[in-house]
Amino acid sequence: MKPIHVLLVVIVNVVWGSMYIAAAIGLEEFPAIFFTGLRFCLLTVLLASYIRAPREYLWPLFKIGALIGIGVYLSLYMSIALAENTGAIAVFSKLEVPFSLILGYLILAENVGPRQIAGTLIAFIGAVLISFDPAAFDDIPALLWMGVSAAFSAYSMIQVRKIPDVHPLTITAWVSMVGGPTLMILSGILEADQVAAMANASALGWIMLIYTAVGSSIFAHSAYYYLLQRYPVAQVTPFTLMSSVFAVIGGIIFLDDQLTLMLVLGGILILAGVTWINLRKAKVTAPAQPA
């Protein structure tokens, strides 16, 4: 991976890590499904000019929109709303890494070498250490929701790899267009007091909602799709392990999460594994050229 793309993926993970903190703050003022649907409706308006796409890509984009806009984000924000320890669920979300490796091999026939597997295992052991920290034991429902989100995320990234010549913001626009109305309907069925939540929300709550939409979806996800269109899933996805480290740090600073030895050791292993994967992969694989 080129150095500029390594820097880009690091910045993406900083934004994603801080997204957990912003969402946890925002969900104190909004119902979870409503919060998610509202941010997608905002994104649909902001990205309306990117919705147009070639006819042959309409169904793939709709499918990606449903997988990410409903499957990934509904379970993600349910997890955040239920979590006591934001850092723990952020790390647990990295189950998408082994899921992506398996699906990349089975569906796209991507080459997964022993060194790459070893690096991913090192990073995943770090994730397991953090997940089995005693602070995470009260978060079983949240962890289960996050596991579902990780599975949807891994499969959706495989689908993104199949449309390499679609603009990343077009993908984000379709995720928003499909996810927004669906989640608003689900919120109307399953939740209550949405109007009161909007009326009583503080400026901070609205800022957090806007940040999760613009920072996470428009910038971070679009940049991530850009990288997926140029590099194999198994090379890009392991970098997302870093977002959990930033989420743990943010949780300690802003949400009074507890810093433990398991969190420190797990974070070190995650960074070591990601570094090993990139260094070894760069020596044996040239990046795919964009269409």
Image (cartoon, rainbow, N blue to C red):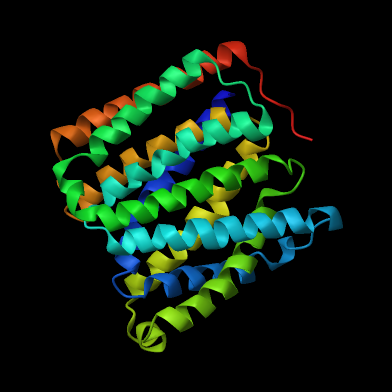
Give residue 134's quadrant in the image: top left
Question: Do we see residue 130 in this rendering?
Answer: yes
Taking the spot 73% from the left edge, 53% from the top edge, the residue there is 60
The x and y percentages for residue 287 are 66, 23
Camera-nearest residue between 197 and 202? 197
* 240 lies above or below 200: above
Taking the spot 40% from the left edge, 62% from the top edge, the residue there is 77
The x and y percentages for residue 129 are 24, 33
The x and y percentages for residue 189 are 46, 82
The C terminus - image quarter: top right
Q: Is residue 204 left or right of residue 228?
A: left
The x and y percentages for residue 41 are 57, 72
Taking the spot 21% from the left edge, 32% from the top edge, the residue there is 264
* 211 lies above or below 184: above
Camera-nearest residue between 218 and 38? 38
Q: Is residue 117 left or right of residue 255?
A: right
Give residue 241's quadrant in the image: top left
